[in-house]
Image (cartoon, rainbow, N blue to C red):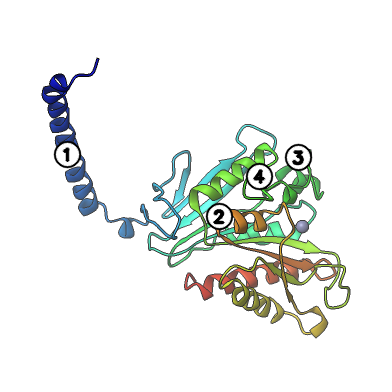
Amino acid sequence: MYTQGKCRSKCHGSLLITVIALTVTLIGLASQAIHASPVEMGWSTFITGPWEPAVTWPPEDSEVLGAGLVKGVLAKGTKHETPYYIYNSGVKGPTVVVIGGMHGNEKAGYMAAREIKDFTVKKGRLIVIPELNKPAVKAGKRTSSLGDMNRAFPRTKTDSPRNSLAKDIWNLMAKYRPEWLVDLHEGYDFHKINKKSVGQTVIYYPLPSAAPMASAMAKAASALVSNPKHAFTVLKYPVAGSLARAVSIRLGTKGMIVETSRKQKLSLRVAEHKAAVDAMLKKLGMR
Ligand SMILES: [Zn+2]
């Protein structure tokens, strides 16, 4: 039983041990900070956003590919296993996520994302999942046995991801709390010609500063086309269940979907996606 008398001697003893342990930890942390400058090494533990907890770098369970670049794996050991790449500049700044292959038949999206994963950034952190639904990408189909991945994410404040891959992706987003997310897709027509198609649009969720960012991305991608009817239109509200919408309503991440039109040459569509992402990174001072 707890008694006042026992505590006086015992608790003061444990308090002293706690104080000594804390002092040793603080001295250890201070000497680490002096000896291993994170910026110089390209590695760091830093807080990039208003919500983000400090993330240890390089992350656990990741493979170091080079200075600042690591590779991790989602849905490990399943047929949906797919890599993600994180380039950490080592300089404080925003975290940006780029997604390709959410729909496996939207080729320009994952082809652009495969190239974007090799981008380096001057500040903040770039996270790329080039082939989110790998079996769908391999089969060239919109969905896999998990169904439509862009309807598998939380739709409300209390909803959960709907399958194991979506859960892994959601955990990654919750860990890094990105400020921005761009998901690369394709539509079947030009939106300015056929309003039923979202081809050639940038679709954003209206959080602060998302609208001017979407406009800058649309402008950069539109600069690659000469026909004004092929220019990009800015639209609001990614569909319910999409990753772009889920991160917006749940994490405060500004989620965007870029849609190119499949009626163009593949090389142009890939270039449009890259131009949109590049415009975002430039506006954020990351490239
Ligand atoms: Zn799509």
Front residue of 65/108: it is 108
Front residue of 36/18: it is 18
Please state the horizontal and vertical placement of residue 56, each as a whole percent of the image.
39, 46
The residue under the point 48% across, 42% down is 62
Q: Which mark is residue 24?
A: 1
Q: Is residue 227 visible?
A: no
The residue under the point 12% across, 26% down is 13
Q: Which mark is residue 159?
A: 4
Q: Where is mark 3, residue-wise?
A: 146
Judged from the image, the secondary structure of the residue bearing numbered disc 1 is helix
Amino acid beneath label 4: Asp
Amino acid beneath label 1: Val
Number of residues whose C-alpha sits closer than 10 Å to that of mark 3, classed few (under 14), some (14–19) or many (20 or more): some
Q: CA distance from mark 3 to mark 1?
A: 50 Å
Amino acid beneath label 3: Leu
Quarter containing ligand 1? bottom right
Judged from the image, the secondary structure of the residue bearing numbered disc 4 is loop
Number of residues whose C-alpha sits closer than 10 Å to that of mark 1, classed few (under 14), some (14–19) or many (20 or more): few
Q: CA distance from mark 3 to mark 4?
A: 18 Å
**Quarter of the rendering containing residue 249:** bottom right
